[in-house]
Image (tube, rainbow, N blue to C red):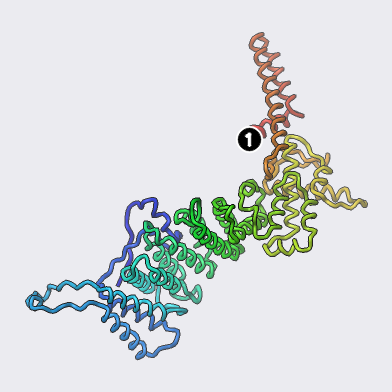
Amino acid sequence: MTSTTTANGQSDPSSSSCLAFQDEFTNSHGGRCFFVAVEPVFEEQISQLATVIARSSATALTEAQRTDYVQQHTTTARQASPSKPVTEDDAALDESTTPPTPPVTEDQLEQRRTVLEQLLRDLKGVRIQALDREFQGFAHLFLSLILSTYKVPDQAFSKTILDLVDTLAFSQGKNVQPTLSTRYATLANVFNSLDTHEKVFDGLRLQVVEKLVEAAAQNDDYLVIEPVVRSLETWLVQWGFAGEAISNENRQKGDEAVLKIVTLLNKGQQIVPRLTLVEKDLLIGHLSHADTEAGSKTQNELASHLIALVLRLPNEYDFTTLSNLQALQQPSTQVLSQVLNVFLQPGSTVQDLDQLLSSDSVVPQLESFGLEVEKLKNKLRLINLSELCSTRVGQRVPYNEISKVLNLSISTNEGGEGEEEELVENWVIDAIRAGLVSGRLQSSETKFWVTKATSPRSFGKDEWEVLEKRLREWRGSLDSILESVKRGLAGGVAQAGAQDVVVSSRSAGAGGREATNEKEMIAV
């Protein structure tokens, strides 16, 4: 039988990419797996594997048929084992002394590979019927035989590893033995067994990761794959499938892997909502390494996914990061780029979005990415409101000015004015909840006193001019205060100097309270 153990102590930094799953169900192997074989007799090992497979056969076998199946593979395995030579010296050996076993020949290794491949073919589409502990022993034994039998690197080795992964991942339900947690642990061991120092394993590691994520996603175990997704971009760079100075072929493989995993994550966002943020971080990290000159179809699809995701997220208003990604200029669906530009461009309003949506073909394209027109308009209104307030910090903004920016359509009939005020207040409250603005509604004066506001759009020329104006006013107030202090110290008239300081401080804003808030805003 075969078991696995791990190396104790600290692992080197390069082994970090070996850690597949890290959660309460699995254990980290520190980037290395060690197999300890007890009584490593090949025919006995094959007999153990065949016994489990015969019991798990898709067609119900009789006891006699199971015995014949096991015996057949055991006999084949015996033929693939070196026979011990019998000499006169052997007869004289003590009974407790075992003669050395001859090395396995190349022909015998080929026979062993044939036996293992046949066992894997018999397991295709079959759920292994075993308890958790037996399943782990079965998986570890099979993996150790593959690692010791095949040449590395070799196409046959890669295919056999992937076939084993498919076999271990196949399940018919969450409540069936072996449990899913046990399957994930054994799949992680397969991933961890691939040497991180061998570049030839990079492509195989990527394929194994894809299968691991796919297996977990099929069973809605998205919490299990979350740490994998968070580490994926780092691994892709480490394995040469992302970053700079890599071949177009490898870049394409990396793009396809990310697209496949993103598609799986989209299906699980209703189950685990925070996956949207994990997906966003993955896409931003990957597209930041994109080669815009050699843009591929897959890369353009990733750009479309990222734009749609950010527009779809209910609490996502900061588009600064997206404005710096050149890969987003060429999404697979061009209308997404146009919508994003409306959100990025300072001063763009709902009317600009309506003009873009006037074409009959636009709305269906947006809906195919899960985007709703009304939600897009509402998000844009909140951005317009925060943009207005960011230029009026420390001031009172009239409701009618806010209504104009929000493009609210209010009836002019009796009661329309009160309805407009209520709508404006509701929008301001929504902006406060979104963290875009802070302040106080003054219903009696129909004004909103702004104490803090952030503009999620790009910081353009107008914003710089507003900032410069505020800084000059602030500097002028400080100069006035310093001058008053100097006069007080030089003339010895402390009381007069103190009064000047108070007066200067109050004159810095529309009132004592407003001036204090103005200074706090600038300090931030």
Quarter occupied by the N terminus? bottom left
The image quarter containing residue 443 is top right
The image quarter containing residue 478 is top right
Q: Is residue 22 left or right of residue 348?
A: left
Q: Residue lying furthest top in this view?
A: 491
Q: What residue lies at 40% left-to-right and 62% top-to-bottom?
A: 201
Quarter occupied by the C terminus? top right
Tell me where residue 502 appears, x and y as whole percent. 71, 21
Q: Please say if 60 is above or below 291.
A: below
Tell me where residue 326 appears, x and y as whole percent. 61, 50
The crowd level at tag 1 (other Cα within 10 Å; few <14, some 14-19, many 20+) is: few
Q: Residue lying furthest right in this view?
A: 414
Q: What SS does tag 1 mark?
A: loop
The answer to whether residue 517 shows anywhere in this view is no
Tell me where residue 100 appears, x and y as whole percent. 16, 71
Q: Please say if 218 is above or below 424.
A: below
Q: Which residue is mark 1?
A: 524
